[in-house]
Amino acid sequence: FLSAKMFPCLLSAALLLTPSLSLDWGRARPLRTDPHRLSPVRVRVSPLRLQVADDPPDDGGGGEAEEGLPDAESEGIADFRAQLMRQMGGGGGGGGGSADAPLSDRERLMRSVETAALADAPAPGRMLLANPAKFCSRNPFARPVKDLGRFGLDGPVSPDEMPPDLTAQMLPVLLLLEHGEGGSSAVLLERRTGALMGDIDIDSFGCVAIAPLWLGGTQRQNALSALHSVEGLEGAAPLRDGLWLGGWEAARPRVADSSLAAARFKFFLGATTWAAGQLEAEVAAGAWIVVEGSPELVLKERLDGSGARRAKPVWAEVLSALGEPGRTAYEAVYGSGD
């Protein structure tokens, strides 16, 4: 059992590690999750009083318990913090950062290279980036994508009415899961449901309880997809080199014992779909930029270490990694001076 004195530290740790994205959607229509799929969790939290010391902590001791806490409780807090960091980082105990020490999953992700290249046609594992020339046009005859509501939009994106980063956040970015003669399906990469994985089922997803649940789309609302970069998981299907779909049952015990990083997984509710030939027609009309992006670019955590500041939106980051082929689209939102 945890004593009341430990709650401020636990709450601080949870807030520190929880990705948070607060969007002012502007003209965007809020996307809703299926209430039959997710049951809202009500948590009663008593007011917490956080005491801040006037003087900085003494750097010299290192062995004393935290002020005001018995030794056992201080050790419990330290163990809990270490467990959270191992859970999010994957593998490895606390040790010292030797040059010969094996890299954790999280360190591998941080050191990996984010690359992108133009692709000639849609295929599973490839990304679709909205072309602002089509998604921002007020001319309905110039918009090959008619049903913008599937992407959380009430109408064309208006870059003149909002900051560039918000415009980029609203421009859809999707990862294709299926593509063939019968149609296509994909998941949106930057739409949050507002729920965490622990809200779904704490028994099945307790080891990733504070991971965000992303909204893949407004269709297939009973489908929950696990996207990851872990090779060899039973039940996982390959999307492309370095990206797999499914296999969470096999991964769960490894994430729970911290031998596999939770950061290698992203979870999506629902999907976005196209009828047979529909996506090909939209691509041919210039609505989408088809990109072959590295797994690191798809799965990247777009928050800094403290969770206090976001990186550029997915749309902007992918075009930046694309380089010269993405310059025209990028400058349509950010201008030539950014």
Image (cartoon, grey):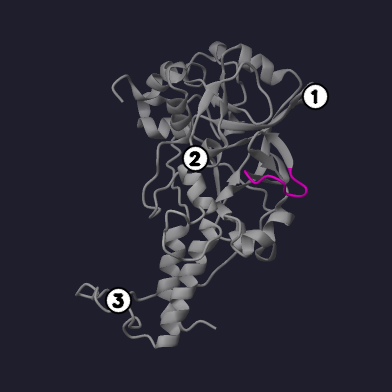
Residue name at image x 40 percent, y 41 percent: 311
- Of the numbered discs 2 and 1, the one sitting upstream in the chain is 2
Give the side of residue 227 with respect to residue 311, left or right.
right
Q: Is residue 112 above or below residue 8?
A: above
Q: Is residue 198 visible?
A: no
Q: Report, in whole angstroms, how far the alpha carbon at label 2 lies from the one at label 1.
A: 35 Å
Q: Please indicate whether residue 251 sits to the left or right of residue 286 in the image.
A: right
Residue 59: assigned label: none
Neighbourhood count class around disc 2 (C-alpha, 10 Å): few under 14, some 14–19, many 20 upward = some
Amino acid tagged 1: Gly
Could you classify mark 3 by the number of other residues whose Cα lies within 10 Å: few (under 14), some (14-19), or many (20 or more)? few
- Tell me the residue at 48%/62% (across/down): 85
| Picture coordinates of residue 193, whole percent (x, y) | 57, 48
Q: Does the rendering let one see residue 180?
A: yes
The residue most toward the bottom is: 70
Mark 3 and mark 1 lie on one chain; the one further toward the N terminus is: 3
Q: Quick one: quadrant of the C terminus?
A: top left
Q: Which residues are magenta?
A: 229-236
Circle 1 residue: 182
Image location of residue 202, percent across then percent down: 65, 65
- Residue at the left extreme, as displayed: 55
Q: Position of residue 69 (x, y in %)?
A: 37, 85
Q: Residue furthest right?
A: 182
Circles 3 and 2 in contact, beta carbons < 8 Å: no
Asked whether disc 3 touches disc 1, contact meaning CB atoms under 8 Å apart, the reply is no
Q: Residue at x 58, y 55 (%)?
A: 262
**What number is the disc on residue 51?**
3
How many numbered marks, from 0 up? 3
Residue 112: give its label: 2
Q: Are marks 2 and 1 in contact (CB under 8 Å)?
A: no
**Residue displayed at 43% across by 78% down:** 6
Quadrant of the image for the N terminus?
bottom right
